Image (cartoon, helix red, strand yellow):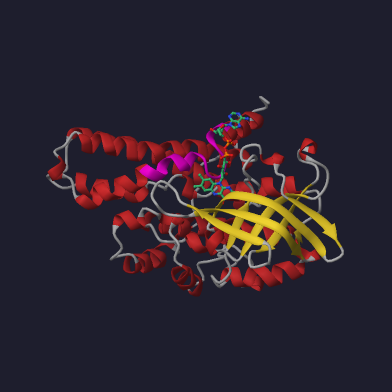
């Protein structure tokens, strides 16, 4: 039970909760004319100008130290900010990964020069990062990565391929997990992380079109890409430990329970009208809220571990596994609810939003580690593996 003991009910401190009002006021204005089916993209929505506007207000790099241009605020403040951004469906995809995990990783493992070079532009909303973990034959089995960085006189020579890299075609840098010694049989040994400038010669980025017709992730090829010596982040051979710590940042946020929230709100607005209200829909609304409320409390409890500087790997896996289940339940249950009605009664924008969310919902339990892999992490936390 130690995994559950560590998730004690926690209140967001008043000084951090106070951030909610100004963020909400800004978003109510900024998002007022954006239709729900566009807002439903949320942290997949890409809008660099919006990211820069948030940064101008100090809302990018909120938890990063002030000396590197960050806000110096706590993990609770970031929880409040992120929760509001997601609830409004703000297009935060441009800076999301840099803010959530790349800059914190550089802060934790980078040299002073790397911190001074990379973190301030992230906080200004000018430098975007992507995650170079998955490869064609190394997704769940991440230790099987084959992309290799070989040391040479000029630094590191990079060869190989990454896949499913979110926003690679829009990003400036990738933090890639690569093999720097040994072979795939050595598993976790011999892996390292390198920062790759995506403008370097030998980098080819090919967007992949998904079911919605959009291209949000990419294949990235490295053909004799010459990296400088300081491309290595952290220690050579410690990549597995670093990537595990990065995944705790990736999985711990409220984005793992709010991916369908814009759809849920749009449907609730319909259910609140006389035409939309049925006994079944009221019961469904209660059922969803009854699942979201404890999940939110668990997510705040995970945040309290981040605030204490701990790495909530198992707890984050637990919240992500249950959270993505609810995120996927919402579009399926709303589709069933609307199916029972005459189609002329249902607002077109609600159907449009449902259509989009239904198409992307299967990805919720794949991105950031599949359901099976998270359950393996939880089993290990329970001492069962
Ligand atoms: C929208 C989206 C965005 C993404 N963005 C990124 C990104 O930015 N950067 C990045 O590096 N990757 C990204 N990914 C890739 C994602 O991390 C992988 O898809 C995921 O880790 C699964 O790997 P895979 O696709 O190779 O599937 P596989 O690993 O081949 O898994 C296939 C199935 O087998 C199951 N399985 C595999 N191994 C086991 C096991 N040991 N026990 C039980 N079941 C198992 C899996 O759970 C899954 O159901 C993204 C994926 C999506 C969908």
Depth order, front residue of 169/61:
169
Residue at the extreme top: 384
User: Where's the N terminus, which quadrant?
Assistant: top right
- From the top left corner, tell me how far across and down residue 360 is, in percent: 41, 45
**Residue found at x 33% / y 40%:** 331
Depth order, front residue of 236/165:
165
Quarter of the rendered image showing ligand 1: top right
Most frequent secondary structure within the magenta stretch = helix
Depth order, front residue of 314/303:
314
**Residue found at x 44% / y 39%:** 362
Q: Is 172 left or right of 345, judged from the image as shown?
A: right
- Viewer can see residue 5: yes
- From the top left corner, tell me how far across and down residue 35 is, in percent: 29, 59
- Viewer can see residue 304: no
Q: Is 263 left or right of 84, judged from the image as shown?
A: left
**Residue found at x 67% / y 41%:** 142
Query: Was residue 63 drawn as part of the magenta stretch in this picture?
Result: no
User: Where's the C terminus, which quadrant?
Assistant: top right
Depth order, front residue of 378/97:
97
55 above or below 188?
Answer: below
Residue at the extreme right: 153
Q: Which residues are magenta?
A: 359-372
249 above or below 19?
Answer: above
**Residue found at x 56% / y 31%:** 372
- From the top left corner, tell me how far across and down residue 98 is, in percent: 58, 61
Q: Is 241 left or right of 153, judged from the image as shown?
A: left
Query: Was residue 363 drawn as part of the magenta stretch in this picture?
Result: yes
- From the top left corner, tell me how far across and down residue 302 is, in percent: 56, 45
């Amino acid at each position: 039970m130690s995994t559950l003991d560590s998730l004690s009910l926690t209140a967001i401190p008043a000084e951090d909760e106070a951030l909610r009002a100004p963020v909400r006021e800004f978003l109510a204005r900024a998002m007022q004319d954006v239709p729900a089916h566009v807002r439903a993209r949320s942290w997949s929505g890409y809008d660099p100008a919006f990211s820069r506007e948030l940064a101008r207000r100090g809302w990018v790099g909120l938890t990063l130290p002030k000396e590197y241009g960050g806000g110096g605020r706590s993990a609770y403040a970031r929880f409040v900010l992120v929760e509001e951004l997601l609830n409004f469906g703000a297009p935060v995809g441009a800076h999301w990964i840099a803010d959530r995990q790349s800059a914190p990783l550089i802060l934790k493992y980078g040299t002073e020069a790397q911190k001074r070079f990379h973190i301030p532009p992230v906080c200004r909303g000018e430098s975007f990062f992507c995650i170079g973990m998955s490869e064609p034959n190394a997704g769940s089995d991440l230790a099987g990565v084959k992309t290799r960085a070989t040391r040479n006189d000029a630094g590191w020579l990079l060869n190989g391929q990454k896949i499913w890299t979110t926003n690679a075609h829009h990003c400036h840098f990738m933090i890639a997990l690569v093999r720097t010694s040994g072979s795939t049989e050595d598993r976790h040994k011999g892996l390292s992380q390198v920062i790759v400038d995506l403008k370097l010669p030998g980098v080819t980025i090919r967007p992949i079109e998904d079911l919605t017709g959009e291209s949000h992730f990419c294949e990235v090829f490295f053909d004799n890409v010459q990296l400088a010596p300081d491309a290595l982040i952290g220690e050579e051979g410690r990549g597995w430990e670093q990537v595990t710590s990065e995944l705790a940042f990736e999985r711990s946020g409220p984005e793992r329970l709010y991916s369908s929230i814009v759809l849920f709100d749009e449907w609730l607005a319909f259910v609140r009208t006389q035409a939309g209200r049925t006994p079944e829909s009221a019961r469904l609304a209660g059922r969803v809220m009854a699942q979201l409320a404890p999940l939110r409390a668990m997510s705040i409890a995970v945040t309290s571990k981040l605030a204490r500087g701990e790495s909530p790997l198992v707890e984050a896996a637990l919240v992500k596994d249950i959270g993505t289940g609810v995120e996927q339940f919402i579009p399926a249950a709303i589709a069933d609810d609307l199916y029972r009605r005459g189609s002329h009664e249902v607002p077109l924008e609600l159907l449009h939003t449902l259509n989009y969310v239904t198409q992307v919902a299967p990805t919720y339990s794949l991105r950031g580690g599949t359901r099976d892999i998270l359950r393996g992490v939880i089993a290990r936390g329970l001492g069962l593996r």
